[in-house]
Each structure stands twice: as structure tokens, then as C-alpha cells.
Amino acid sequence: MKSDPLPQQGRDAGILASAGRPGAAPTLARRVGAKLLHELRSALPPTIFFFVGFNFIVLTTNLLVADYATAVSNFMLATLGALVVGKAVITANAMPFLTRFDRAPLILPILFKTAVYWVAVFFARLAERFVHFALVDGHPPGEFATYLVSTFSWTRFVAISLWILVLFLIYVTATEFSQLFGPAEMRRLLFAYRPSELQLNRRQRARELMRLNRLADDHAVDEFRDPRSAAHRELVDIVERLARAPKLKL
């Protein structure tokens, strides 16, 4: 026997009761926590990379001017700069047009993403300078344009921007190759494979793939489906040679 449906008022009360359950707030907190953790993980690689890069630039620059008893920068500013870059990378990654050239030859996404990241960091550094000018130094915000024209050290700003451009080019290139091969494969390429074994395996596979390409051009699909045909036997031989190719040692 079917039970009578709940009245609309009873259903609304049930919905409100379920929304007010103790588990609802922890679920929302977990989602927010997972989102924040994802953002932090996204910002961690560029932040670490630019932390090392900026501090290396500061170290070498201070060593060059050490004879003049002058320090042109410090490690705290380099660390803050790395944090600004990490935040700018998160902002740029949220832009939908960043993947516009992902299916193009690799040089295009590398140059495009480098330019986008560099522009994002450029404006982020100006915004950081504005906050310091207005809040820390206590100047009126309307005088910021005059400060940029008359007092601001554009030569130092441009020099750092050029270094950021070079570092971004290195970072994006490494990131694109890592996404292309996969992080695990990149680790094996860098730390496990021997160059001689890698080159030999690559040449053998290239020859077999070229034979497979010529075979596909010379024969129809029906010939490959027929186990008695010569095309089918040659196809099986090529696949077996590819499968039996020497595996790379780990």
C-alpha cells in the first residue's frame, strides 16, 4: 500500500532540519579547506622556484658589489617577491584564455604563458608598490602617479622585470615538458635512464613506427583484419617488435 505523500509544509521542515544538521557545516568547511589546499598547491611550485631564483640573483648581485660595501637588495625582499609571483600565477591560471595555444607547437604555449605570467606579475608588483606607498608610507593615493614619474626607480624595476621574464621562460618550459611527458617520466629521464639506452630505444621505435605508417598507407583496413593476408602478418610482426623492444632500466 502506498503511503500518503508528505505535505509541502512537512517537506520544507525536513529540508530546513537537514540543513541545520551538525554535519552540514563541517562539509562546507571541508570543501573550503580543499579549495584552499588546491590553491596553495598550485602556488607552491612557482613560489619555490622564484624563491630560489630571486635569492640567487640577490646573492650574486651582492657579491659583485661587495667591494663597494654596498648591498643592492636583501633576501627578505626576494622572498616577498616570490610570494607575489606565486599569487600572480594563481590569478593567471584562473584565466580561461591561458590554454588557448595548448594544442599548438610547444613553442607557442611556452611563449604565450610566459608573456601572460610576466604581465600579471608586472601589475602585481605595481599594486604591491601602491599598497606600500599608501598604507605603509602614509602618502595620499592620488600622489602615486606623481611618485611613479618623479621618484620611483624604474631602472631597478625594469631590471628585476627582465630577470622575472627569463625565470618565467625557464619555469614555463620545464612545466610544459613535465606535462607533456608526465612527472614520473621526467624523473626517469633525468635520474634513471642512460643516454645510450634511451637513444637506442628511440631509434628502434622510430623505425618500426615508420614501417607501420608505410604499411597503413599501402593496405586497406580489410587486409589487416584478414589473418591470412601478408599485411596482417607484417602488422603483427611490427607490433611484436615494438613490444619486445628493450625496456629502459630504472
Image (cartoon, grey):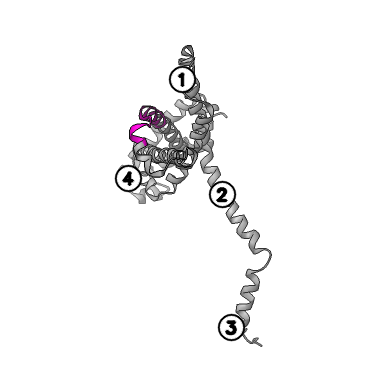
Front-most of residues 167 and 6: 167
Q: Which amino acid does label 3 sit on?
A: Gln
Residue under the point 54% across and 27% down: 191
Label 2 Cα crowd, 10 Å radius (few <14 / some 14-19 / many 20+):
few
* Label annotation for residue 36: 2
Helix, strand or loop status at disc 1: helix
Mark 4 or 3, nearer chain start: 3
Looking at the image, tell me whether mark 2 or mark 3 is earlier in sequence order: 3
Which residue matches tag 1?
A: 61
Which dot, 1 or 2, sits closer to the camera? 1
Secondary element at tag 3? helix
214 vs 42, nearest the viewer? 42
Name the residue: 46% across, 13% down.
Answer: 68
Where residue 246 appears, as percent x and y from the top left, is 51, 30
Which numbered mark, 3 or 1, is in the foreground of this view?
1
Q: What residue type is disc 4 on?
A: His
For the residue pair 192 and 45, the one nearer the viewer reads as 45
Q: Which amino acid does label 2 sit on?
A: Leu
Q: Quadrant of the C terminus?
A: top right
Label 1 – label 4 distance at C-alpha: 65 Å
Find the distance from the CA under tag 2 to the CA under tag 3.
38 Å
The image's mark for residue 250 is none
Q: Mark 4 points at which residue?
A: 219
